[in-house]
Amino acid sequence: MKTFFRRCDPEGRGTRGRIAGGPIALVVLLALIASAGSAFPQEKGAAALPGGGGAGGRRMLEPGAVAPGFTLKDISGEAFDFEAEKTRSPFLLVFFSIFCEPCRRELAAAQRLHDKYRDAGWRVVAVSLDGVPLGYAVAGFVRQEGYAFRVLVDELDARDTFRAADLFGVAEIPSTFVIEKGGRIAFGRKGPTTTEELEKFMQPARKP
């Protein structure tokens, strides 16, 4: 079974993300060897990447658009229905890969925001684009880093497109969205963001 991840390009120069060091690197390499057909993940839709288009010509969703619904399993195998959940809470949504070094910094910022704003009703969800075959490697990465927010694993549908990432037009990782309660996108960015940028859109929902 194929696994895919999108371009990891922190400075817009077409560079590739490196596998982070430490024990997780060995887990990832073993998982890659175990993946049928290839010892390395193949990049999907590379021709569509320049200019920011997603797979199949989709563009990244912009502020004001309604975030699409999707259902994925988290790293524990429990289903998560975003269509239902977005009516209950505002969300910080991060698309990432364990192969992407800038994603580690993005997720660390997401953890800080999770700690700061969860009592105000905000929820943080991260979506891995590493594929279901690497789900246990993603779970190991999450445990190693100590992330306390929900982590989902995106998967390919019958048309060979991601069930969540392609709906949002994600063509680079990390990609981050701030989504208001009800589903309207307040902020979207491909590539790294800063905590300060994200907080500008999250502060209005804080409790007094």
Image (cartoon, rainbow, N blue to C red):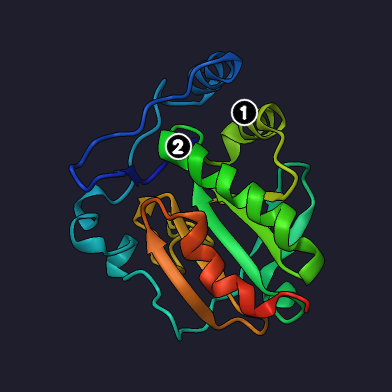
Q: Are marks 1 and 2 in contact (CB under 8 Å)?
A: no
The quarter holding residue 125 reads: bottom right
Percent coordinates x, y for residue 13 in the rendering: 18, 43
Q: Residues within 10 Å of mark 1 (few under 14, many from 20)?
A: many
Disc 1 marks which amino acid? Ala
Percent coordinates x, y for residue 19 in the rendering: 43, 24
Apparent side of residue 68 relative to residue 7 in the rendered image (left or right)? right
Measure how far apart labels 1 and 2 are at the Cα level.
Answer: 15 Å
Percent coordinates x, y for residue 104 in the rendering: 51, 37
Look at 24% across and 48% down and name the residue there: 46
Task: Note whether 31 is above or below 87 in the view shown.
Answer: above
Query: Which quadrant, please, contains the C terminus?
Result: bottom right
Q: Provide the secondary structure element on which disc 1 rests.
A: helix
In this rendered view, identify the residue nearer to me: 169 or 186.
186
Task: Note whether 25 is above or below 161 in the view shown.
Answer: above
Residue 100 visible, this orientation = no
Disc 2 marks which amino acid? Lys
Look at 52% across and 83% down and name the residue there: 66
Look at 27% across and 64% down and name the residue there: 53
Where is mark 1, residue-wise? 137
How many numbered discs?
2
Percent coordinates x, y for residue 59 in the rendering: 31, 71
The quarter holding residue 134 reads: top right
Where is mark 2, residue-wise? 2
The numbered mark, 1 or 2, whose residue comes first in the sequence reads 2
Q: Residues within 10 Å of mark 2 (few under 14, many from 20)?
A: some
